[in-house]
Image: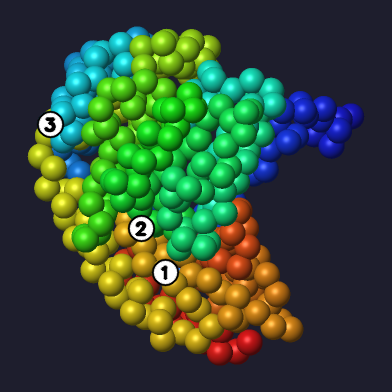
């Protein structure tokens, strides 16, 4: 007789407290509909629609041929560590040492390592709303307490006054994310510095998630916390990623830059978790940083064109209000103007849009912002045009 082993699985308390990823759920919903032959427009995907540049793929092929198919040091190969250090030196004169850098299986693992190696039960971790869905989940997993900072009043751009008001004696860490997923908003360099000065005075640790570092639209400027003077960086961990910049989501490569002590603690976590990131992907990532950068510029130019078109098109849809994203590749419109008898929440907006017009957007609630939805413009102009047509038709039907 076959036993049903999953129905009463004694899931651990740590995992029971976590929610599944809302963004991955939206992607999977779109995938399932496509597989069933439905003509879906997918604004859900948080990943570039571009292919990984050819020089990067070639480097991976060469690595395989050369037999780089074995375990590597936990914190990554020397070649990749040096490529990361050199990139931060060229761009930001950051002066990182090899003991302060580690390669990870995606930026997500860098954030996971950073939180799990620092947070004790009851420690408070600050983050601005809207936040990337994964931040509070990792904090909860580590038995910390996520503390959310409302930023709607400042157009979703976090400032030092808001941070100062949220600090308590239990605050251990803050997670900054500029450019932000989902709002696309960017913290200007002056304000970023003010926030870091305040945190440094209070002895609070910082994770700066710079996953969208290179996708910033002028007049906003690319800014990394690595630019700050050393005295403001002693409690800082930068989490970076190859996923978006080089269209490498599936390769699972990211990195952390932090003090020697924090890096050591993170390496301990990683050594018992994934051992090391994929050896072949590490060679590819080194080429991504050391090789030609034209592909990054080409992607940014394409996102710039799509962003401009999408923001104009959204203005034409009654009931939608959308602030200007300054980075990343998301629009985050307020859809409360469409609420009424049929649609009363952003989840219902997303669900009914899917049912009625086979169009996927991500409910803002998963990012802590009920009343908003996230649209990814990492999709073709053709899909954008078709999707906006469908959203307009849907909104007009309400
Ligand atoms: C804000 C943010 N941080 C980190 C990541 C992690 O990306 P990855 O693990 O693919 O490097 C993502 C991916 O969507 C993200 O949006």
Q: Is residue 73 left or right of residue 268?
A: left
- Residue shown at 52%/63% (left/top)? 153
Would you say residue 152 is visible in this rendering?
yes
Q: Earlier in the sequence, mark 3 or mark 2?
A: 3
Residue found 35% across the figure and 47% down from its top: 191
Q: Residue at x 32, y 59 (%)?
A: 326
Mark 2 neighbour class, 10 Å CA radius: few under 14, some 14 to 19, many 20 or more? many
For marks 1 and 2 on the same chain, the one whose residue lies earlier in the sequence: 1
Please state which of the two labelled residues, at mark 3 or mark 2, is closer to the viewer.
Answer: 3
Q: Residues within 10 Å of mark 3 (few under 14, many from 20)?
A: few
Q: Say whether mark 1 is within 8 Å of ligand 1.
A: no
Q: Position of residue 32 (x, y in %)?
A: 57, 57
Question: Which disc, if any, is residue 37?
Answer: none
Residue linked to disc 3: 90
Indicate whether 316 appears above or below 222. Answer: below
Disc with the residue nearer the chain's start (3 vs 1) = 3
Asked if 362 appears above or below 320 in the picture, the reply is above
Quarter-of-image position of residue 124: top right
Q: State the residue at coordinates (36%, 30%).
A: 238
Farthest-out residue, right: 1
Q: Give x and y (percent) for residue 371.
A: 61, 68
Residue 61 in picture, x, y percent from top left? 22, 28
Q: Are marks 3 and 2 in contact (CB under 8 Å)?
A: no
The answer, for residue 139, to whether it is visible in the render is no
Asked whether disc 1 touches disc 2, contact meaning CB atoms under 8 Å apart, the reply is no
**Residues packed near mark 1 inside 10 Å, few (<14), some (14 to 19) or many (20 plus):** some
Q: Quadrant of residue 331?
A: bottom left
Identify the disc placed on residue 323. 1
The one of 42 and 187 positioned closer to us in this rendering: 187
């Amino acid at each position: 007789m076959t036993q049903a082993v999953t129905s009463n699985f004694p899931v651990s308390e740590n995992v029971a407290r976590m929610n599944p990823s809302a963004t991955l759920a939206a992607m999977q919903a779109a995938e399932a509909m496509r597989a069933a032959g439905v003509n879906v427009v997918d604004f859900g995907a948080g990943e570039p629609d571009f292919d990984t540049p050819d020089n990067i793929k070639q480097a991976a092929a060469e690595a395989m041929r050369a037999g780089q198919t074995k375990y590597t040091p936990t914190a990554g190969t020397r070649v990749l560590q040096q490529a990361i250090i050199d990139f931060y030196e060229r761009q930001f004169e950051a002066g990182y040492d090899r003991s302060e850098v580690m390669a990870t299986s995606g930026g997500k693992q860098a954030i996971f390592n950073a939180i799990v190696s620092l947070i004790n039960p009851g420690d408070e971790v600050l983050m601005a709303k809207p936040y990337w869905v994964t931040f509070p989940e990792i904090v909860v997993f580590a038995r910390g307490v996520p503390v959310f900072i409302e930023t709607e009043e400042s157009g979703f751009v976090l400032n030092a006054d808001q941070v100062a008001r949220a600090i308590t004696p239990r605050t251990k860490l803050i997670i900054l994310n500029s450019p932000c997923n989902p709002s696309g908003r960017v913290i200007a360099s002056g304000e970023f510095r003010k926030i870091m000065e305040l945190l440094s005075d209070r002895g609070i640790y910082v994770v700066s998630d710079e996953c969208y570092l290179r996708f910033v639209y002028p007049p906003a400027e690319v800014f990394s916390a690595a630019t700050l003077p050393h005295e403001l960086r002693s409690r800082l961990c930068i989490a970076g990623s190859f996923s978006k910049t080089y269209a490498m989501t599936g390769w699972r490569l990211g990195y952390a830059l932090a003090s020697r002590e924090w890096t050591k603690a993170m390496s301990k976590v990683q050594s018992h978790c994934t051992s090391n990131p994929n050896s072949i992907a590490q060679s590819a990532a080194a080429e991504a940083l050391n090789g030609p950068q034209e592909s990054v510029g080409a992607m940014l130019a394409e996102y710039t064109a799509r962003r401009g078109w999408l923001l104009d098109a959204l203005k034409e849809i009654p009931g939608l209000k959308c602030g200007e994203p300054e980075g990343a590749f998301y629009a985050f419109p307020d859809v409360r103007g469409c609420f009424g008898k049929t649609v009363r929440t952003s989840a219902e907006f997303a669900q009914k849009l899917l049912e009625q017009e086979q169009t996927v957007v991500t409910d803002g609630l998963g990012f802590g912002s009920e009343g908003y939805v996230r649209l990814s413009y990492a999709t073709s102009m053709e899909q954008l045009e078709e999707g906006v047509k469908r959203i307009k038709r849907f909104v007009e039907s309400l």
